[in-house]
Amino acid sequence: MENTLKIMDLPENERPRERLIRFGPETLSNSELLAVILGKGSKGENIVSLSNRILMECGGLNGLLSCTGEEFMKLRGIKEAKAAQLLALAEVSKRFRSYRSGDEYRVKSPEDAAGIVMESMRYLKQEVLRVILLNTKNVVILSKDVSMGSVNSSIVHPREVFTEAVKRCAASIIICHNHPSGDPTPSSEDINITHRLKECGKLLGIEIIDHLIIGNGTYISLKEKGFL
């Protein structure tokens, strides 16, 4: 069996788990918190050193949130089990920082809608189109991806956008898509597809109340810009 170095192999005063319990999680560095979650290192490398290297090679916590399983397993000392732990950690972090599934969430402004999707969409490396379904009181029914790849009128079909809304009897929807560049400035194609989907929504009796373009920590509401 591979001899891996665990937290308990460290000197007592260097064990992050014990310091976390004794002094609180806020006293630990990012790499030490990651070490507590992963539990053990790899052959010849203790867990704190491994965790520090993971963060460095991924580009910090933000980079960690955007890595795929394949990218994690390219790192020395990371196999399928640890890659799965890291993916789960990233997903839980995104969910805590955005819409909390199971809670009633009412959208009153573009900022509210952006808060639902920002953390899960800002680091995506390709364009994704997501719809937020709302009931008559603007309470979120569901947030779901409907298209991946370049978001343009030749690829995004109204059928994909409205199918779930019809099935769930949504009163209205908010369209969201990201710009991997981090710049949410709308293109002419973004505006064209918004107008096209708005007209389709009228025929179905489902209002499109906004189209949000998500950048890196920022967003643009096409409604606020006067395009809806």
Image: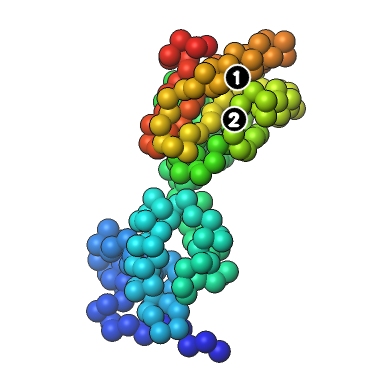
Tell me what residue is drawn at x 43 percent, y 77 percent. 41
Front residue of 133/106: it is: 133
Q: Position of residue 166 (x, y in %)?
A: 73, 23
Quarter holding the N terminus?
bottom right
Tell me what residue is drawn at x 51 percent, y 60 percent. 71
Tell me what residue is drawn at x 28 percent, y 82 percent. 12
The answer to whether residue 166 shows anywhere in this view is: yes
Q: In the image, is 42 to the left or to the right of 204?
A: left
Q: In the image, is 79 to the left or to the right of 196?
A: left
Q: Position of residue 33 (x, y in %)?
A: 35, 64
Tag 1 secondary structure: helix
Kindly identify the amino acid type of the residue bearing the numbered disc 2. Val
Task: Give the colour scheme of this rendering.
Answer: rainbow
Pointer 2 and pointer 1: residues touching (CB < 8 Å)?
A: yes
Front residue of 88/49: it is: 49
Could you say which disc has been placed on residue 113 in the image?
none
Kindly identify the amino acid type of the residue bearing the numbered disc 1. Ile
Residue beneath disc 1: 193
Q: In the image, is 54 to the left or to the right of 151?
A: left
The answer to whether residue 107 shows anywhere in this view is: no
| Above or below, comparing residue 30 to residue 193 in the picture | below
Occupied quadrant, residue 57: bottom left
Front residue of 194/82: it is: 194
Q: In the image, is 33 to the left or to the right of 203?
A: left
Task: Count the numbered circles shown.
Answer: 2
| Above or below, comparing residue 75 to residue 171 in the picture | below
Mark 2 packing: few (<14 Cα in 10 Å), some, or many (20+)? some
Mark 1 packing: few (<14 Cα in 10 Å), some, or many (20+)? some
Residue beneath disc 2: 151
| Above or below, comparing residue 32 to residue 106 in the picture | below
Occupied quadrant, residue 140: top right
